[in-house]
C-alpha cells in the first residue's frame, strides 16, 4: 500500500525531532555538569581587608588582605615606616589577629596610666585578645604571640602565609570584630617615663617592644571590589574546557536540529 506524501513527510519530521532531542539532551547535561563543577561557581571564598593605621605616633602604615577558604586563611600584608632596628638588629615586630572585643582600634583615651603610650593591655578592650599570630614560620596560635624569632623584621616588609584558622578567629572575622595589630615602637619616640617602663606582656623587654604600632579592623569585601586587590579570574584549565565543550555541543546539536528541520521541510 502506498503511503501518501503528506503522511510520509509527517513521519520523517517526527523521526528528525526525536533524533535531535537525543543529541541536545546529552549536550545540555554536559554543559550543566561543567558549570556545576567549575571552581568559579563552587568556591566558598571570603576576602577581608584592613588599612593599617599608625597608633602611638609610629608614623607607619600598611595594608593587609586575608582570603579565607574553608578553614584555610591566606594572609598578604605590606607595611612600611616601622621602627627599623632593635639592639643593633632588625626590629622584630610581632603581629596578630586580635578577636573577641569591640573590633576597633583604640585612641589615646585608652592610655589609662597617662604615660603617653597605649600599651597592648590598655588597647585590649578595643581589639581583644590574640586569635592568631601572624608568624613567619611555625606556630600561629596565641602561644607564639611574643616569639620575636618569628616576627616581621625591620622597618618595611611583606608577609604572605597560609594557615588553618581556629573556629573563634573565623567567627570573629565573620562578625566583623577581627583586628590586625602590629607591635613594636621606636623607644626614642616615647616619653622619658615610658622609656623606663617594662613591657606589660614580657617584663624582660621594654614597653616599646610590645606596644601597638599599627592597627586595622578587617572588613569582608565582595570579590573583585575596588581596593581589595582581588579579582575573580575567568575560569581556565580543564573546567574551561568542559564549559567550552558543553556549550559547543549545545550549539552543534541546535544547529543540526535546525538543518534537519529545513531538509525535512
Image: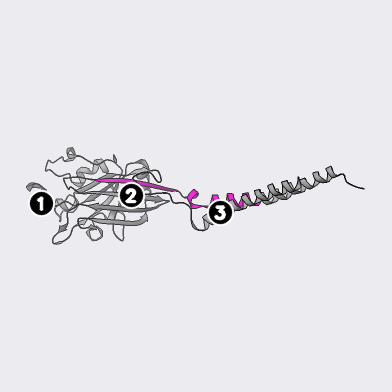
User: Helix or strand or loop: what does disc 3 sit on?
Assistant: helix
Front residue of 191 and 122: 191
Residue 65 image label? 2
Are discs 2 and 1 less than 8 Å apart at CB? no
**Is residue 58 magenta-colored?**
no
Which residue is painted at 62% across and 53% down in the image?
249
Query: Residue 184: x and y, percent?
Result: 19, 52
For disc 3, the neighbor class at 10 Å (few under 14, some 14 to 19, many from 20) is some
Left or right of 204: which side holds 235? right
User: Helix or strand or loop: what does disc 2 sit on?
Assistant: strand
- Residue furthest to the top in view is 109
3D distance between C-alphas at marks 2 and 1: 31 Å
Regarding residue 128, the answer to whether it shows in the image is: no
- Classify 117 as above or below 150: above
For disc 2, the neighbor class at 10 Å (few under 14, some 14 to 19, many from 20) is many
Question: What range is drawn magenta here?
Answer: 26-52
User: Which one is earlier in the sequence, the residue at label 3 or at label 1?
Assistant: 1
Front residue of 256 and 200: 256
User: Which one is earlier in the sequence, the residue at label 2 or at label 1?
Assistant: 2
User: Helix or strand or loop: what does disc 1 sit on?
Assistant: helix
3D distance between C-alphas at marks 3 and 1: 63 Å
Which residue is painted at 26% across and 54% down in the image?
145
Front residue of 133 and 232: 232
Residue under label 1: 188
User: Which one is earlier in the sequence, the residue at label 2 or at label 3?
Assistant: 2
Left or right of 195: which side holds 151? right
Location of the C terminus by quadrant is top right
Quarter of image, res 157: bottom left
- Classify 104 as above or below 166: above
**Is residue 35 magenta-colored?**
yes
Query: Residue 264: x and y, percent?
Result: 76, 47
Residue 244 image label? 3
Amino acid at each position: 500500500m502506498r503511503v501518501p506524501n503528506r503522511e510520509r513527510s509527517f513521519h520523517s519530521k517526527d523521526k528528525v525531532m526525536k533524533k535531535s532531542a537525543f543529541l541536545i539532551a546529552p549536550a545540555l547535561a554536559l554543559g550543566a555538569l561543567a558549570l556545576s563543577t567549575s571552581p568559579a561557581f563552587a568556591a566558598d571564598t571570603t576576602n577581608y581587608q584592613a588599612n593599617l593605621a599608625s597608633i602611638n605616633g609610629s608614623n607607619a602604615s600598611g595594608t593587609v588582605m586575608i582570603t579565607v577558604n574553608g578553614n584555610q586563611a591566606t594572609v598578604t600584608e605590606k607595611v612600611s615606616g616601622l621602627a627599623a632596628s632593635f639592639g643593633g638588629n632588625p626590629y622584630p615586630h610581632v603581629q596578630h589577629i586580635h578577636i573577641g572585643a569591640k573590633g576597633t582600634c583604640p585612641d589615646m583615651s585608652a592610655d589609662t596610666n597617662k604615660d603617653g603610650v597605649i600599651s597592648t593591655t590598655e588597647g585590649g578592650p578595643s581589639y581583644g585578645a590574640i586569635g592568631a599570630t601572624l608568624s613567619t614560620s611555625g606556630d600561629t596560635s596565641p602561644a607564639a604571640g611574643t616569639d620575636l624569632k618569628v616576627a616581621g623584621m625591620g622597618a618595611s616588609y611583606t608577609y604572605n602565609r597560609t594557615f588553618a584558622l581556629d573556629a573563634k578567629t573565623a567567627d570573629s572575622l565573620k562578625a566583623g570584630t577581627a583586628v590586625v595589630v602590629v607591635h613594636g615602637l621606636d623607644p626614642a619616640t616615647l616619653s622619658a617615663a615610658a622609656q623606663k617602663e617594662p613591657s606589660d606582656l614580657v617584663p624582660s623587654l621594654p614597653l616599646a617592644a610590645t606596644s601597638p604600632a599599627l592597627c586595622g579592623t578587617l572588613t569582608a569585601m565582595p570579590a573583585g571590589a575596588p581596593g581589595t586587590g582581588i579579582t575573580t579570574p575567568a575560569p581556565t584549565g580543564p573546567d574551561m574546557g568542559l564549559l567550552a565543550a558543553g556549550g559547543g555541543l549545545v550549539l552543534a546539536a541546535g544547529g543540526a536540529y535546525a538543518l534537519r528541520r529545513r531538509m525535512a521541510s
